[in-house]
Amino acid sequence: MNTTRLVMTGMSFAAVAGLGLACGEDDATTDPTTANSSSGQGGDSASSTQMAASTSSINVAVGVGGSGGGDVGGAHAGGDNAGGDADGGAGGAGGGGCIVAPPAQNPGTISLASTMSGTGKFVEYDITGSLAQIDFGNGQAGDADGLYNPMNPAMMFGSGLDLFPNETAFQVGSVAYDPNLVCTTGTQTVPIDTLDLTGLWQASSATTDINDVALGLWFFAPNTVSLSFGALDASDTITFVDGSPTSIDVSVVAMAVIDYSSGQHAPATHTGQFSVAGDTLSLNIDETVTVTVDLGFGAQTTQTRLEINLPGDVDAIP
C-alpha cells in the first residue's frame, strides 16, 4: 500500500491509495517522519521507505510497505490484516478533517472575469496623441470610447473607435490550480499553475477586452500593437477558505510592444505589471521610451509615453 501525506502551511493532507485525499487543520499533530506501513502476515518483516521533499510551502512524505491495512485519520482501510497503520496526523478520529475522493484528474480553474472601473484608459501621448476610456461613448456595443485628445477629452478625433467592446464587463481569462490541494474545510493557500489572459487581448481579435482591430486602426495599420505577459513564480497563489476561493494573489510583468514602422525599425516596448491582489485586478503600464518611427516622412527618433491603466474587481472573489 502506498501512503502519501502533503503538509502545507497551516494545513495537513493525507492520502491512501483507493481512499482519496484526507485533509485536516491541525499541523501540530502531523510529523512526516511517522508515516509507515507494515505487514504482520506470516511473520514477514515490514519494509518501509520514506522520502521527504520540500518547497517553500509544501512538504511531502511517502511511505511504501507491505500488504497490511492502513489507518488514516482514524478510519481503517481493508487489507490482508489490520496490523499495519499509516498515521494521517491531523484529521484523525474526532479531528474534523475533510476527504476529497477520488482525486481530481483535471486542473481547477477560477475565472478572472471582472467588473472594471469606467475610468480605465489607454493613452499614447506623443506620436498619436490619443486617448480611449471605457466610460466614453454611450456604453452600447460599437460606441466611440476612443479616440480623444488627452489634453482635451471633449475633443474626439474623426468618428472614433471602440477600443473596449465589452465596456466594464471584462472577460480577462482564468487561473488554474491543483484541486487535490484544496479541502472543503479550513484554509489552504495553493500555487497558481497557469495564467490565461486570452480574454484580455488576442492578436487580430475585435471581441477581446482590448480590441486589437481597433488598435491597428489607431496606430496606423499595418503597424502592430501586441501585449505579452511574464512568467509565474512561487509567490503567485490562491487562498481557499472552506473550499471556496477568497483571494487571488498574482503579479507578472506586462509588456506592450508597438511597432510604429511596419517592421522597418525596432519596436518600442513599454513595460508594466498585470496583477490581482485579493479581489482587485489591475493592468498598469506607464512608461516613456525612445523610438524610431517612419510615418512616411523619413526615419525620426522621438520619445513616446504609453499609459494603460485598467483597474477592476474580480467577480469570482467575494
Image (tube, rainbow, N blue to C red):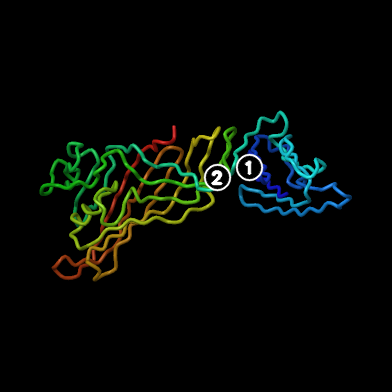
Which residue in the rendered view is the most extreme toward the left? 158
Mark 1 — residue?
20
**Closer to the camera in the image, 302 or 77:** 77
Q: Secondary structure at mark 2?
A: loop
Q: Mark 1: which amino acid? A: Gly
Q: Quadrant of residue 288?
A: bottom left
The vertical placement of 252 against 243, above or below, is below
Which quarter of the rendered picture does the C terminus lie within?
A: top left
Residue 61 location, x and y as percent? 70, 49
Query: In x, y percent, where is residue 2?
Result: 71, 50
Relative horizontal placement of residue 114, taking residue 141 as reference (left or right): right
- Mark drawn on residue 210: none
Separation (CA) of disc 1 from disc 2 = 9 Å
Nearer-the-camera pick, 118 or 124: 118
Quadrant for residue 267, please give it.
bottom left
Q: Which residue is mark 2?
A: 104
Residue 127 lies in quadrant? bottom left
Three-letter amino acid code of the residue under disc 2? Ala
Residue 84: x, y in percent? Answer: 80, 43
Q: Secondary structure at mark 1?
A: strand
| Left or right: 26, with 115 as reference point | right
Q: Residue furthest top?
A: 94
Which class describes the residues within 10 Å of circle 2: few (<14), some (14-19), or many (20+)? some
Q: Count residues near mark 1 (Cα–Cα under 10 Å), then give few for <14, some for 14-19, many for 20+.
A: some
Lower sequence index among marks 1 and 2: 1
Q: Residue at x 26, y 48 (%)?
A: 207
Q: Is residue 30 left or right of residue 290?
A: right
- Nearest the eye: 43 or 111: 43
